[in-house]
Image (cartoon, helix red, strand yellow):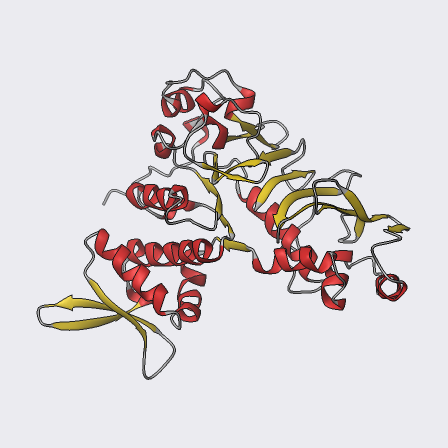
């Protein structure tokens, strides 16, 4: 379960932002059924980030992704995503912070990365019984390791494997060092990223087809949308996924990659929802505009329904669509608005409930489109170049 995520000085994110899933202290009359109670915490099921074209929304998705990858691989390996990109052009490192609960233990992890992809700063706190303790702190060349929680052998493993391109979480995950290995497992197993629907779709579904419960879930959900799918299986001749449609008294199979965009996007996204709900994972969806509004609302309702989402999976989605803002089940505490600074090209993120005065029954979509919260994009067509010259015979 995620409590908070923050980022600063990463690509277009200069001033920084914090996404807060912890709604403790918020008055009950402005909360909605999109939260759940866990011990002393009241946590949001979902957070939505809304921004128009050109507001650098992708950088928000990438900030969470690169934090995960930094804990699972050395920062200078070729398979690290975004390796060829550079960070915000100043002397400050890119900073990431995540606070989460895993195996009933609360953690707070901070990582700072230099523009040459080396670790600048790293620290980890954990609170097994409510009281927070520092497990380790790495500040450039200085290193602190908790003197009582780790054996001499474990400390030696950390020190001997220390590398400017390796996070301590990555080292401890591979060396099976207690306490910190739990954090490595969280990043490895508890996060799901959805970005390129067409590129990732078939291979992802291929791995899930061994689960009969998955097939039942997807087929029954498609039928809820009056799409008469009877079967999903692998081709006998290759590894293509086949979707079987009812046709009179027979079933006609069509390859997944030959489906319409609407159907393939629906199946891929709901497959991720199934996996997230099944295991209580944190699902991060980028550019969720690939689906229609009805599917969008269904996705959110699956996450918000505590009879379905019994393991408290959480969702962070990024979208250009404002239509979902008018839905009553999405309230101000879960809404973040993205604005791009025209002069400095910075990506600024505002929590609706904390940054603006919003009336209880205000139409949030109308307020967003009219510029009540953030300045709407101004499209100047005066500089448009178009060739209107036509040859006359």
Q: Where is residue 50 in the image (x, y as percent from the top left)?
A: 46, 34
Q: Where is residue 207 in the image (x, y as percent from the top left)?
A: 44, 70
**Looking at the image, which residue is at 12% across and 68% down?**
247
Residue 56 sits in quarter = top right
Compared with 141, 40 (above or below) is: above
Compared with 315, 236 (above or below) is: below
**Looking at the image, which residue is at 57% across and 25% down?**
25
Q: Position of residue 110 (x, y in %)?
A: 73, 44
Q: Which of 266 and 36 is in front in this view?
A: 36
Q: Determine whether, in the image, residue 218 is placed left or right of residue 283.
A: left
**Looking at the image, which residue is at 23% across and 52% down?**
224
**Looking at the image, which residue is at 67% across and 41% down?**
10
Q: Which of 79 and 245 is in front in this view?
A: 245
Q: Determine whether, in the image, residue 222 is placed left or right of residue 380.
A: left
Residue 239 visible to the viewer: yes
Q: Quadrant of the C terminus?
A: top left
Compared with 177, 311 (above or below) is: above
Q: Which residue lies furthest to the bottom in this view?
A: 237
Residue 162 sits in quarter = bottom right
Compared with 7, 357 (above or below) is: above
Q: Position of residue 46 (x, y in %)?
A: 47, 40
Q: Determine whether, in the image, residue 174 is placed left or right of residue 211.
A: right
């Amino acid at each position: 379960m995620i409590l908070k995520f923050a980022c600063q000085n990463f690509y277009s994110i200069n001033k920084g932002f914090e996404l807060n899933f912890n709604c403790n202290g918020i008055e009950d009359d402005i909360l909605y059924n999109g939260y759940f109670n866990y011990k002393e915490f009241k946590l949001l099921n979902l957070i939505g980030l809304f921004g128009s074209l050109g507001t650098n929304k992708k950088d928000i998705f990438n900030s969470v992704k690169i934090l995960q990858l930094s804990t699972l691989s050395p920062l200078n390996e070729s398979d690290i995503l975004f390796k060829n990109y550079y960070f915000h052009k100043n002397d400050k490192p890119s900073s990431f912070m995540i606070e989460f609960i895993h195996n009933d233990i609360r953690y707070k992890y901070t990582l700072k990365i230099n523009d040459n992809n080396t670790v600048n700063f790293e620290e980890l706190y954990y609170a097994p019984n409510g009281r927070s303790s520092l497990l380790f702190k790495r500040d450039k060349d200085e290193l602190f390791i908790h003197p009582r929680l780790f054996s001499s052998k474990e400390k030696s493993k950390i020190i001997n494997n220390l590398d400017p391109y390796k996070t301590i979480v990555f080292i401890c995950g591979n060396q099976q060092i207690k306490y910190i290995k739990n954090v490595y497992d969280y990043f490895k197993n508890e996060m799901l990223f959805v970005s390129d629907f067409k590129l990732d779709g078939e291979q992802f579904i291929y791995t899930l087809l061994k689960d009969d419960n998955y097939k039942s879930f997807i087929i029954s959900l498609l039928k809820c949308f009056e799409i008469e799918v009877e079967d999903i299986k692998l081709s006998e001749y290759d590894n293509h996924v086949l979707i079987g449609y009812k046709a009179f008294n027979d079933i006609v199979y069509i390859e997944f990659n030959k489906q319409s965009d609407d159907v393939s996007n629906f199946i891929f996204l709901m497959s991720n929802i199934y996996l997230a709900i099944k295991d209580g994972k944190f699902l991060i969806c980028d550019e969720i505009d690939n689906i229609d509004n009805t599917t969008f609302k269904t996705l959110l309702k699956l996450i918000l329904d505590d009879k379905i989402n019994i393991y408290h999976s959480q969702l962070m989605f990024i979208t250009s669509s404002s239509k979902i803002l008018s839905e009553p089940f999405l309230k101000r505490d879960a809404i973040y608005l993205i604005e791009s600074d025209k002069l400095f090209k910075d990506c600024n993120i505002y929590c609706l409930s904390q940054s603006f005065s919003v009336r209880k029954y205000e139409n949030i979509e109308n307020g967003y489109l009219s510029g009540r919260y953030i300045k709407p994009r101004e499209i100047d067509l005066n500089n448009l170049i178009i060739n209107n010259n036509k040859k006359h015979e």
